[in-house]
Amino acid sequence: MQQMTQIIANLQEASSSDSSRPPAFKTPSMKAPECLYGTQPFKVRSFIQSCQLIFHNDLANSSQDRKKAFYATLFLIGMAENWIEPYLSDLTNQDPRYLLNSWKLFQSQLFTLFGDPNEVRKSENEFDSLRMKEGGHVSLYIADFGSLVSRIGDWGERALIYHFRRGLASIILDQLTSYTSNIDSLQDLMVITLELDTRDEVFKDSQDVGEDDYVSSLHLFLGNMDLPHLSYHDSLEELWEEEEEPGEIETVIRVVPSVYHQYLDVFSKVKAEKLPSHCACDHHIELEGSLSPVG
């Protein structure tokens, strides 16, 4: 505890001796980084990312390496504190290559000493084998892709675009092949694939409807027709014959041609008696065989 108090005092003294010191980082409603002990390699990256969030919340000071290194130092304890302590004895050193004057060097040393030495290699292997699941969501694939990209370093835009496309599900790739607009950036590619995935989900939702939903829709439209002497079979056949004519009924019937015979089964003489009460209302249309609605 005494060591930490002395470190803070040294930092404050160094800051006060600099007449051109910048204002403190503005961090409203932002959680401070968790202290880094240096004994858990998997926590180094999350520590750095937490610091980066704090820094980017105050863009006016985000380019000041010295200030960022000082801030991160306050959260180093245990082994990590022992590592940084010698550097605190020379806070007046203005050499750009000095550890506390280079945020990039500071991060690199943290990863080298306390991070997972195999992290990059493992991340590259995961990245190379990353694939979107068939029937999965593009948003989840993008999240996994972005997480791995943040760990493997700078591969370049074209390489990332290639790997992103390669891992997409076949249904998305098939649609991309017919996409005529130029895709010049990874961001553009992600936006387009999200749009394609959303469009595909809407289509699947429109097909994934249960029998009761079809029956209810059919009742709604048949109930608005003045066909008092027609059976359900006759009504369906008449609607089917009129499908070329524009109108609300034609549109709905056109959407569900594949289940036409399913309607016939539902309203057959055998099944008519088994219809639940909410599906057996006749809406002024007689059931086939003059069966009375159940009810």
Image (cartoon, rainbow, N blue to C red):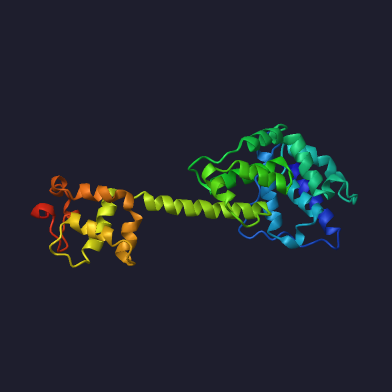
Q: Above or below — where is 58 with respect to 167?
A: below
Q: Above or below — where is 76 with respect to 221?
A: above
At which x and y percent is residue 149? Answer: 67, 44
- Say which of 26 and 154 sits in front: 154
Q: Is residue 30 left or right of residue 269?
A: right
Q: How many marks?
A: 0
At which x and y percent is residue 173? Answer: 56, 46
Q: Is residue 212 left or right of residue 131?
A: left
At which x and y percent is residue 206? Answer: 38, 53
Kindly tell me whether residue 79 is visible in this rendering: no
Kindly tell me whether residue 59 is visible in this rendering: yes
Q: Residue at x 15, y 57 (%)?
A: 231
Q: Is residue 203 left or right of residue 188?
A: left
Q: Residue at x 65, y 56 (%)?
A: 182
Q: Residue at x 71, y 31 (%)?
A: 118
Q: Quadrant of the C terminus?
A: bottom left
At which x and y percent is residue 263? Answer: 24, 50
- Say which of 62 and 288 sits in front: 288
Q: Quadrant of the N terminus?
A: top right
Query: In the figure, residue 80 lies in which quadrant?
Result: top right
- Say which of 8 and 209 sits in front: 209
